[in-house]
Image: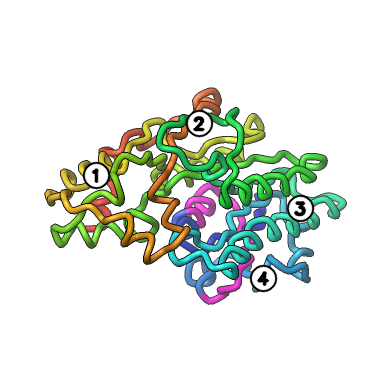
């Protein structure tokens, strides 16, 4: 299948692009970082584009049989100034609207549209438990996710739409775990904040497998929580990582320090939410790494 992709040059993309090519797909990589894209895949077609703006790049969408939309400004790497909040929203909502505009305008265009969203859709809670049927939250990230998903709906008139509400993606070379590994290697790791907040996570390999399955299987349609079936608390995460690495996990990162560094963005890791993958269970998706110890063992080995 010929796929038009956004957001595939970062932490997830560096694993997803090879997985898509291994599955036999031909890729068009739309990106603001063409050199990075060419290094990632010398055989992919690279289209330099700012997908937050309509432009000539949209013509390439009509040549594709499928779309993967994973564009999104990082949400937990800097303070949420008004400017950064605008970027967070535009990179997700406006990009998706521009993609859907191109999909619906094509005479014979993509037949499947796989779009990212996030478990932030549900809002943050230490006590709640969420499935795909749960209502959305009311905080900033929840509203962004709801707009993000709403932007995909016009595409349902002409193609199959799959929305993946992505949890915390774990891998050795980026994301939340990539930042924790060096600290634990120094023997000064521990939980972030109280340690009681929930982490709904997925191994990056399983996210790639899920994306490949969603493209290939016509039964995939609608919203899926892209999380492993066994969420953990941040304290359990730190303890399991410490055991896997043979390092202590006793020194917590104080919440006030994290808030001083990230401002509102700290809420992503300080509150969290417990999210179930009910729809994936009904679909019969089989995780390669269903439990955290299995996932961490593979990741730590890959990073050593």
Residue at the spot x=51%, y=45% of the render?
166
Q: Which residue is mark 3?
A: 100
Q: Residue furthest bottom?
A: 35
Q: CA distance from mark 4 to mark 3?
A: 15 Å
Q: CA distance from mark 1 to mark 2?
A: 27 Å
SS category of the residue bearing label 1: helix
> Which-is-in-front pick, marks 4 and 1?
4
Disc assigned to residue 297 = 1
Disc assigned to residue 50 = 4
Q: CA distance from mark 1 to mark 3?
A: 40 Å
Residue at the spot x=15%, y=62% of the render?
186
* Callout 4 crowding tier (Cα within 10 Å): few <14, some 14–19, many ≥20: some
SS category of the residue bearing label 3: helix
Q: Earlier in the sequence, mark 4 or mark 2?
A: 4
Q: Is residue 83 left or right of residue 206?
A: right
Residue at the spot x=60%, y=28% of the render?
133
The picture places residue 44, in percent across and down from the top left corner, at: 58, 64
Q: CA distance from mark 2 to mark 3?
A: 28 Å
* Callout 2 crowding tier (Cα within 10 Å): few <14, some 14–19, many ≥20: some
Residue numbers of the magenta segment? 16-35
Q: Earlier in the sequence, mark 2 or mark 3?
A: 3
> Which-is-in-front pick, marks 1 and 2?
2
The picture places residue 107, in percent across and down from the top left corner, at: 87, 51
The picture places residue 137, in percent across and down from the top left corner, at: 58, 40
SS category of the residue bearing label 4: loop
């Amino acid at each position: 299948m010929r796929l038009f992709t956004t957001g595939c040059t970062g932490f997830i993309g560096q694993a997803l692009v090879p997985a898509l090519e291994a599955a036999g797909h031909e890729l068009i990589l739309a990106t603001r970082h063409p050199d990075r894209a060419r290094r990632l895949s010398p055989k992919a077609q690279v289209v330099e584009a700012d997908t937050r703006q309509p432009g000539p790049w949209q013509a390439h969408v009509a040549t594709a049989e499928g779309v993967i939309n994973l564009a999104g400004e990082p949400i937990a790497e800097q303070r949420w100034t008004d400017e950064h909040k605008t970027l967070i929203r535009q990179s997700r909502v406006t990009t998706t609207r521009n993609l859907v505009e191109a999909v619906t305008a094509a005479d014979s265009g993509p037949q499947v549209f796989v779009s990212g969203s996030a478990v932030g859709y549900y809002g943050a809670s230490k006590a709640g438990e969420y499935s795909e049927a749960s209502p959305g939250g009311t905080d900033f990230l929840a509203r962004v996710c709801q707009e993000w998903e709403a932007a995909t709906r016009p595409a349902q008139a002409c193609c199959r739409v799959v929305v993946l509400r992505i949890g915390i993606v774990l891998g050795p070379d980026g994301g939340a775990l990539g930042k924790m590994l060096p600290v634990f290697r120094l023997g000064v790791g521990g939980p972030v904040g109280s340690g009681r907040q929930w982490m709904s996570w997925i191994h990056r390999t399983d996210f790639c497998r899920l994306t490949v399955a969603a493209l290939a299987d016509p039964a995939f349609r609608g919203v899926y929580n892209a999380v492993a079936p066994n969420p953990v608390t941040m304290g359990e995460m730190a303890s399991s990582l410490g055991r896997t690495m043979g390092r202590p996990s006793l020194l917590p990162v104080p919440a006030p320090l994290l808030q001083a560094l990230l401002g509102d963005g700290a809420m992503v890791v300080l509150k969290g939410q417990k999210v179930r993958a009910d729809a994936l269970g009904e679909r019969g998706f089989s995780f390669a790494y269903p439990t955290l110890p299995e996932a961490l063992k593979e990741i730590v080995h890959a990073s050593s």
